[in-house]
Image: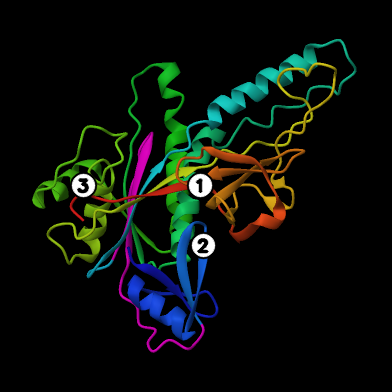
Amino acid sequence: MYVPVVDKEQNPLMPTKPQKASKWIREGKATGFWKKGVFCVRLNVEPSARETQPICIGIDPGSKREGFTIKSKAHTFLNIQTEAVTWVKDRIRTRQIMRGARRSRKTPCRANRQNRARGGIPPSIKARWQWKLRLCDWLNKMYPITNFVIEDIKAKTKGLKCWDQSFAPLEVGKHWFYSELGKIALVKIKQGYETKKLRDMLGLEKTSKKLAEIWEAHCVDSWCLANWLVGGHTKPDNKDMLYLKPIKYSRRQLHMLQSVKGGIRKKYGGSISNGFKKASLVKHTKHGLCYIGGSGKTGISLHCLETGKRLCQNAKAETIRFLSFNTYIRRQVISPQS
């Protein structure tokens, strides 16, 4: 995987090989740093050249998994498979139930106000497109992106109210994403059947196992879309992937869903854990690279960066070194052909 390069003012330049990046760091020409879980280098000197090649991001949206490919004519810099944001709808429903339960009690409370959740894009659909937009904005800060190519999705109408009522929000959310993406770089749209033609022309196959952590699940389509625009390859040159899973944040709650014995309220939710922002990428003296979880009376909770599994609950702040802010669980998936 190529290492992203930025100048002194954080402007992205063309990526470089890991060997050259290590040499720059040893000679003092560059400084290594983490940008939300990806290692980058920042040049301490003026770059020898600022010319950049066209770099495209191919996007294959999905209901459960999604594919992103960052590619130029010469190299495939990065393949990303992500999990879609699917839990917002359930959380909104839980919030509505608990709010209704509180208002039905015989206790003084404020009067009902107009439902502010009505109108606009539903939270569950908006969260899905916002997650894609955040990823594209994050990648644009590491690579000099010139174009986006995205496979268009269309909602099917069936003449049923329970089904068709979600048709318009999906279309609105999609066009909102396209307009916001256009503020970053040029956007081109391909239909699903056009992506299949590109895949067949290159002799590539897409697996039917949509949840599998393999390149052929989603990145095959995103790679075909990016290669269609910038060209340069008749077969994939890099099938290694970075698998990302967004971390679920819990909002600060005054009342838990169930009352605690003794009437003592537990501290729950929030974004700060003993001075560290939750999900931040840190390095611990014992557990190495991990991310911040919750906090308790005994210390800070640390979690594995690849699986999200909790490593400990009693880490001390003095044994932790902050590296970067973070919003997802990540792991490297190496292709057997590499």
The residues tagged by marks 3 and 1 sit, at their Cα atoms, a distance apart of: 29 Å
Instruction: Classify 23 as above or below 67.
Output: below
In this view of the protein, which residue sits in the foreground, 140 or 46?
Answer: 46
Q: Position of residue 170 (x, y in %)?
A: 44, 35
SS class, disc 3: helix
Q: Is residue 48 magenta?
A: yes
Task: Classify residue 262 as left or right of residue 56.
Answer: right
Q: Are marks 3 and 2 in contact (CB under 8 Å)?
A: no
In this view of the protein, which residue sits in the foreground, 237 or 70?
Answer: 237
Q: Earlier in the sequence, mark 3 or mark 2?
A: 2
Q: Position of residue 329 (x, y in %)?
A: 48, 45
SS class, disc 1: strand
For residue 73, say whether it is visible: yes
Rendered residue at 32%/51% (across/down): 241
The residue that label 2 is drawn on is 35
For residue 122, say whether it is visible: no
Q: Quadrant of the C terminus?
A: bottom left
The residue that label 1 is drawn on is 328
Task: Classify residue 52 as left or right of residue 293.
Answer: left
The residues tagged by marks 2 and 1 sit, at their Cα atoms, a distance apart of: 12 Å
The residue that label 3 is drawn on is 195
In this view of the protein, which residue sits in the foreground, 269 or 146?
Answer: 269
Instruction: Classify 125 as above or below 159.
Output: below
What kind of residue is marked 3? Thr
In this view of the protein, which residue sits in the foreground, 18 or 62?
Answer: 18
* Bounds of the magenta segment: 44-71
Q: Position of residue 149 (x, y in %)?
A: 31, 55
